[in-house]
Structures are given as structure tokens and as C-alpha cells.
Image (cartoon, rainbow, N blue to C red):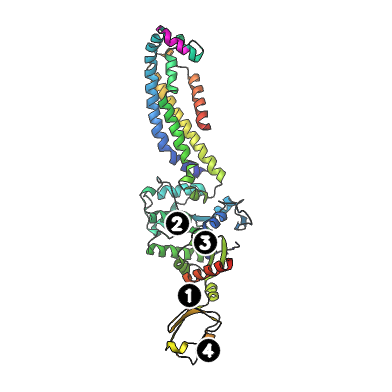
Amino acid sequence: MNRGLIIRALRELWPTTLVLGLVLIGVEAMLGFVLPKFGSQIAQEWLQMEFARGIMQAMLGTEIAERIGPQMFQAMAWVHPVPLALTWAHALLCCTRVPAGEVDRGTADVLLGLPVSRWEVFISETMVWLVCGAGILAAALAGNLLGGLGLPAEQRPPLARVLIVLINLYCRMARS
Amino acid sequence: MSLSVGEGTLFGFLGPNGAGKTTTIRVMLGFLRPTTGTARTFGLDCWRDSKAIKRDVGYLPGDLRLPAWMNGENALSIFGAVRGRDLRRSGRELADKFDLDLRVKVRDMSRGMRQKLGLILALAHSPRLLVLDEPTSALDPLMQQAVHRLLRELAAAGHTVFFSSHSLAEVEQLCERVAIVREGELVADESLAALRQRAGHEVIIRWKDESQTRGLEPPAFLKLTRREGAEWRGTLEGPAHRLVDFLAGKPVEDLSIGRPDLETLFARYYQRSREGGR
């Protein structure tokens, strides 16, 4: 890895990461706070609707209505389309800028004219976008924890479970 | 292509679009692996040791693109960090020479300003070899003169300058040695003086009376390119006294013998190589 390449890639990616990170903090905090509140009301409705319970049971192969609670609704903050779209948008924006975007934007020639190997360019820039991806998910986690502060302690999902979700999400982002 | 450039040379590399100039440069810098043969810079293999070679090389690509958010100051610190040395001081000195404000962002720069920044980044670490692909294409004549001065100073100090250009006049003004490339093959590689020597003299003979030249055939050493009325234009091969001897006693009104400019040379080499290829 090369320090100069890392600085360059960081300068390339930090505005996108900062903006999307701030948006994610806000969205996750709102979802983490609002969804469990709606959730407890919806759960009660579900329990009374035989037809809806039957459909869900047929779709999922298990009876879930009685397990619907605030924690489950808070977990939805991680599969809600808005945070998912924001995390994917970040991954796409970063990966199309470094390292692949260097060729499209024509900046690869200047970069390869410097005393670095192709591997150094690839590894340094990949490391930077992986770190930025971790930063984005850390922002989402911060937002989720922030939203959870407005809920009673027993309604908050355990941190260990949230981390499992985050690691899963991170691996999928990195793989793509 | 067989090409060798000695240290401290101002070397002009000429050829039209698609001739292989940029490909040659890319091979030299280790961007491309040669399909056949070998390429060596500073005695090192261009592909295998490209990183070591590029420590002592300053490169300005023909189509220079820098990230839009960059300005001169942070370009110098980033390039310095990549090279492991502080380039800010030498960069500022060069910016003063080129009259460039290093605080302006690339997105707000004109093409000429970007080209100046590219030159500063290529020169800031005082490289042993400077590879410049069309370096002055976007610069005004005054700035071109400043670049030429600087390149001459560098060559005088023992730096090698590999100068690829379409501008024949510029190469003629600047370079000591010239190579002409066509379809990936060298058609000429020699000093500008030798190139001109070999290319012969441009001759214009104006006769007093057209009627007196009827039936008069030019000697073998004078290749006529145009014979129009009382005027002959052609190329003299060999020493000029043979022509003077030939013309002695003949009704000549005016005679002009001169060296061809590089443009004519280029066209001639190209023509010759095309004919040879057929």
C-alpha cells in the first residue's frame, strides 16, 4: 500500500461518505424510533386478523404473528428500502470512482506514471473504499442506536444481533 | 522498432495520429508489456522494473486528466506522498516560472492551466528522464518559450527529455535528435543536422528564358519535383558544387539552395517509407 494513494483515494471518497453517512444517521434514527412504535399497534391488529395470519403462515411456513413485537419492527430498520438504497448507492459511487473509475475518467495514466505498481493502486484504493463502507455502516449503526434511545430498554434489540446484521450487510456490500 | 536514447538528449519523437508514439511511451513506462522484443530504461526492464524506473521519470500524458477536486497545492502534496518526498517547494518555484496559481481547483482551470500543472507535476522531482507527450499543445507562445527554455536547461544539466509532438516546428526548434515513426515502425532516427544533411538541399532555379531550357534534362543528382515555365524546383543530393558546375555557362537568372524544413523532411520520409512499403 502507498500512503499517497491512500490520501488521494480518501480525498476522492470522503465527501460522498460524509453526505450519505449523515443521511443514513438521520434515516436510521427515525426508523429505529418510529417503527417499533407503529409495530406494537400493528402487532395487535395482526393477532386479530385470522386471514392475514393465515397468509403469513403460508408464505413463511411458520406462525409469526405472536412473535411480532417492537424488536422485530426495529430490525426492519435494517431491511427498509431507504437505508439499503443508501448503502448500495455508497458502494456503487465509491467503486465506480476508485479503482475502476480511474480508467474511465482517464486519470489512470497520471497515476500509473508515478512510481507505483498496478497492485499498489488496486490494493490501496480498495482498502480505502472498504474502510469508507465500514464508516457508512457505522453511521447507520449510530443512527439506529440513537433512535433506540427513545424506546424503553427492553424494546431495544441486543447489540450483538445488530452487529451480526451489519457484518452480513458489509460482506454483501464488499462482495458486490 | 529499435530505438535508443542517450542521457542528456533532447529527443523528438514524431509521427501522425495512430503511428504508435503513445504506445511506445506506454511500453517505456511499463503501462504495456511489449508483445515482442525488450524495452529498457536506465538499463532496467520496462515491464518488470517499471516501479523503480518511474522513480526517476517525470511523465506528462497527452490527454492529461486530473481529479476535478484537486488543486495545485494538494496535487503536489499527494504526488509528493506517493514519491516519498516533499515536492511543494520545487513545485511552487515551477509554478512561479509558469505563472500558475496553485490554489485554483482543476475543475476551474483552463486547458492551458491544467497543462502547466501537469508539467509542474512531471518536473517537480527533477527526474532523470522526462517523457512529454504533446506538452505545449494548449500553451500560448510565451509559455511555450518558457517550457522550451526549461527543457533546454534540463537537458544541459544532463536530464534526458523524450519529447513526443505533432508540432514539427517545435521539435525543429528544440530537439537535437529526431525519430519519425509510422505504423509502429521507425522510418528515421538521427540527429536533426544529419537528417537534413541526408535529405539534401531544396533547390529553386529560375531561368532567364523558358525556351532555352527546352531539351535540357536535369543531372542525376538533381531530382525535380516541379518544372513550371522558367522555374525548376527540386532536391539536390550530394554537394552543391556539382550543381554550380552544371549551371555554369547556362542562362540562370536566379538560384536558391537551402535546407528543407522539418515539415518537408517529414513528408519526404513518409512518402519514401510508403513507397518502400508497397
> Which of the two marks, 1 or 2, is nearer to us in this view?
1
Label the magenta part by its dominant secondary structure.
Answer: helix
N-terminal of the pair, mark 4 or mark 2, is 2
Q: Quadrant of the N terminus of chain B?
A: bottom right
| Amino acid marked by disc 1 | Pro
Nearest to viewer (mark 3 / mark 1): 1
Q: In the image, are marks 3 and 4 on the same chain? A: yes
Q: Earlier in the sequence, mark 4 or mark 1?
A: 4
Give a yes or no on whether discs 4 and 1 share a subunit. yes
Q: Output the chain of dot 4.
A: B
Q: Nearer the viewer, mark 4 or mark 2?
A: 4
- Image spot of residue B168 (x, y percent): 46, 67
- Name the residue that disc number 1 marks: B260
Can residue B202 be seen here? The reply is no
What amino acid is labelled 3 in the image? Phe
Q: Amino acid at mark 4?
A: Asp
Residue found at x 53% / y 86%: B241
Within 10 Å of disc 3 (Cα), the crowding (few <14, some 14-19, many 20+) is many
Question: In this view of the protein, which residue sits in the foreground, B74 or A31?
Answer: A31
Q: What residue did someone put label 3 on?
A: B162
Q: Secondary structure at mark 3?
A: strand
Indicate whether residue A53 is drawn in magenta: yes
Residue B41 lies left or right of residue A58; in this view the side is right
* Kind of residue at disc 2: Leu
Region rendered in magenta:
A48-56
Q: Give the residue at mark 2.
A: B119
